[in-house]
């Protein structure tokens, strides 16, 4: 089983010198055209920034880029949400590694395009999509042909009239999902009622846990979810270390400003609090990648200690969070600084792609240069 094509690739360069996680060093580098590009990061984790990566076809323009994943061939799949009330357009655009568009599809998911990830099953890769407008999870092949669509689960009886706060209807808006080792998967109801739903390989509901709250086991916007298969012991806040016999689930408990860990059957294990507004995940070797909506992209080591918060700048963050006005004003975006990273992933060479929740979309390639 594979999650994005790079999950079973070799680890990113190891042996980096320990550095202060909150510091990102900015330098310049010449590219082949002689123009200057910003390099961010530190030590062995330095990346050259190319903002505005990828060439869109004439019939598509970005509207809030939300998700990204890479297949085994190196093709990059970018998913945008779309603006409600606008003319529908394809929500998924596929690029080759040079940034050339090779195809697009998914107009039927407009304006609900959100999570997108890839799993290989029986020799074929499939897309798993989350739609926050039509409130579904969809499985397709890499060309967008639908295998199945999944609505809110009825079995846990947590949705519908009287199930929400104050007796209001409880909503279901799946944002991202994670793949289970046994062929099943987990869905995070990030924009709905804050539950995690587990399904078997044959798409049968297994269990549901969570719900809204701040205490351990509860969540406020479980926006991203991932299988943490790193073989090391699980390191949590307050020096807690748990020996793992297998993988665990990590959830981007976004509005609670934390990563929350669970066993595969939903038992809460603990939290990692070195996050601002975490959105989703990827893993390459021992490195956990966390795009953070509050203007940075974080890398954590096997002990869940921050290696570096890429692009981190507290003063810039004040500007970014001031009414979210920068989100809609591209002229204020600065090279080497993020606005609102919403998803990110490694490619097979250890480079990082970042997509941001901004009005006109933004795709950044962080080319590993260390």
Image (cartoon, rainbow, N blue to C red):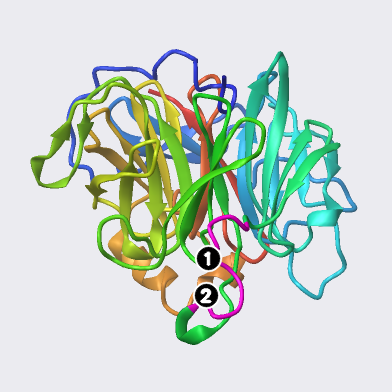
Residue at the spot 43% in from the left edge and 69% down from the top edge? 320
Q: Mark 1 or mark 2: which comes first in sequence? A: 1
Tell me the distance, in whole angstroms, between the alpha carbons under discs 1 and 2: 6 Å
Q: Position of residue 367 (x, y in %)?
A: 51, 30
Q: Where 295 sits versus 332, above or below?
A: above
Residue at the spot 37% in from the left edge and 27% down from the top edge? 247
Horizontal side, residue 281 vs residue 153: left or right: left
Horizontal side, residue 335 vs residue 130: left or right: left
Question: Element type at marker 2?
Answer: loop
Q: Position of residue 86 (x, y in %)?
A: 82, 72
Residue at the spot 77% in from the left edge and 52% down from the top edge? 91
Residue at the spot 71% in from the left edge and 40% down from the top edge? 54
Can you say which quadrant of the picture contains the N terminus?
Answer: top right
Check disc 2: other Cα within 10 Å, few if <14, some if 14-19, many if 20+: some
* Image marks 1 and 2: residues in contact by CB distance under 8 Å: yes
- Residue furthest to the right in view is 59
Residue sitting nearer the eye, 3 or 17: 3
Q: Where is residue 125, by image quadrant?
A: top right
Residue sitting nearer the eye, 164 or 357: 164
Q: Where is residue 203, by image quadrant?
A: top right
Q: Where 142 sits versus 21, above or below?
A: above
**Which label is found at residue 158?**
1
- Residue furthest to the left in view is 239
Question: Element type at marker 1?
Answer: loop
Camera sees residue 355: no
- Which residues make up the magenta segment? 154-164
Camera sees residue 274: yes
By secondary structure, the bulk of the magenta-drawn segment is best described as loop
Badge 2 is on which residue? 163
């Amino acid at each position: 089983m594979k999650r994005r094509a790079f999950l079973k690739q070799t680890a990113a360069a190891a042996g980096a010198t320990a550095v202060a996680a909150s510091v990102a060093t900015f330098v310049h580098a010449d590219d082949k055209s002689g123009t200057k590009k910003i390099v961010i990061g530190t030590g062995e984790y330095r990346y050259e920034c190319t903002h505005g990566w990828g060439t869109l076809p004439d019939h598509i323009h970005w509207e809030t880029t939300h998700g990204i994943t890479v297949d085994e061939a190196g093709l990059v799949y970018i998913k945008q949400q779309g603006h409600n009330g606008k003319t529908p357009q394809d929500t998924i655009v596929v690029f080759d590694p040079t940034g050339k568009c090779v195809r697009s599809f998914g107009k039927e998911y407009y304006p609900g395009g959100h999570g997108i990830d890839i799993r290989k099953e029986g020799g074929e890769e499939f897309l798993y999509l989350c739609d926050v407008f039509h409130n579904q999870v969809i499985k397709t092949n890499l060309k967008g042909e639908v295998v199945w669509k999944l609505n809110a689960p009825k079995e846990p009886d947590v949705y519908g009239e009287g199930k929400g706060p104050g007796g209001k209807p409880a909503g279901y808006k799946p944002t991202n999902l994670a793949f289970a080792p046994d062929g099943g998967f987990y869905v995070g109801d990030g924009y709905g009622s804050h539950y995690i739903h587990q399904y078997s390989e044959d798409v049968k509901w297994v269990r549901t846990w969570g719900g809204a709250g701040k205490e351990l086991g509860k969540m406020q916007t479980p926006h991203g979810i991932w299988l943490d298969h790193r073989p090391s012991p699980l390191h949590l806040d307050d020096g807690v270390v748990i020996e793992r016999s297998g993988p665990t689930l990590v959830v981007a408990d976004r509005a609670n400003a934390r990563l929350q860990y669970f066993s595969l059957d939903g038992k809460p294990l603990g939290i990692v609090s070195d996050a601002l507004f975490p959105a989703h995940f990827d893993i390459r070797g021992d490195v956990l990648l966390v795009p953070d909506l509050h203007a940075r992209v974080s890398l954590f080591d096997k002990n869940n200690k921050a290696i570096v918060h890429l692009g981190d700048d507290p003063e810039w963050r004040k500007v970014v969070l001031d009414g979210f006005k920068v989100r809609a004003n591209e002229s204020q975006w600065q090279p080497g600084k993020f606005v609102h990273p919403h998803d990110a992933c490694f490619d097979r060479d250890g480079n990082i792609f970042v997509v941001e929740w901004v009005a006109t979309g933004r795709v950044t390639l962080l080319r590993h240069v260390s």
